[in-house]
Image (cartoon, rainbow, N blue to C red):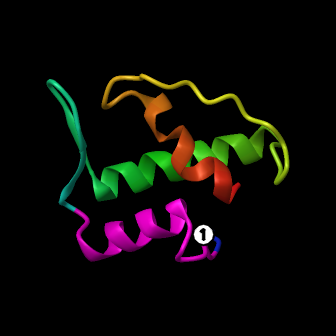
Amino acid sequence: MKTQTPVFTLPGLLVRAAEADHDRVAVSGDSAHLTYGELEDRSSQLAAALVDLNVRPGDRVVVVAGVPVGRPGQTNLLKVESV
């Protein structure tokens, strides 16, 4: 079940972009890319996994930067806020 995400947050903007242009490339790297739809799907999966681990609003979550495109860690910043 999806929760409503405020539009003027990074997660909210991602949801709107995925709805408006699902197949448009959102992130690209040397040899891979993700569309807005793929990025939204992956970030939603990450948010759900964090909730399953009992991460709640106000909890601290470590963010790993510099992860290549296409790897699960790259979606960390996009959905941690919406957990």
Q: Residue at x 83, y 50 (%)?
A: 56
Left-right relation of 25 to 54: left
User: In the depicted view, which residue is nearer to us: 65 or 25?
Assistant: 65
Image vertical order of residue 75 relative to residue 15, above or below: above
Q: x and y percent of residue 1 in the render? A: 63, 68
SS category of the residue bearing label 1: loop
* Residue name at image x 19 percent, y 60 percent: 23
Instruction: From this view, report whether residue 82 is shown above or below residue 34.
Output: below
| Magenta stretch encompasses residue 12 | yes
Q: Is residue 8 left or right of residue 14?
A: right
Residue 70, picture quadrant: top left
Numbered label tally: 1
Which residue type carries mark 1? Lys
| Stretch in magenta | 4-22
> What is the crowding at mark 1: few (fewer than 14 residues within 10 Å), some, or many (at least 20)?
few
Q: Residue at x 16, y 24 (%)?
A: 30
Which quarter of the rendered picture does the C terminus lie within? bottom right
In the image, 59 versus 42, the foreground residue is: 59
Residue 58 colored in magenta in the image: no
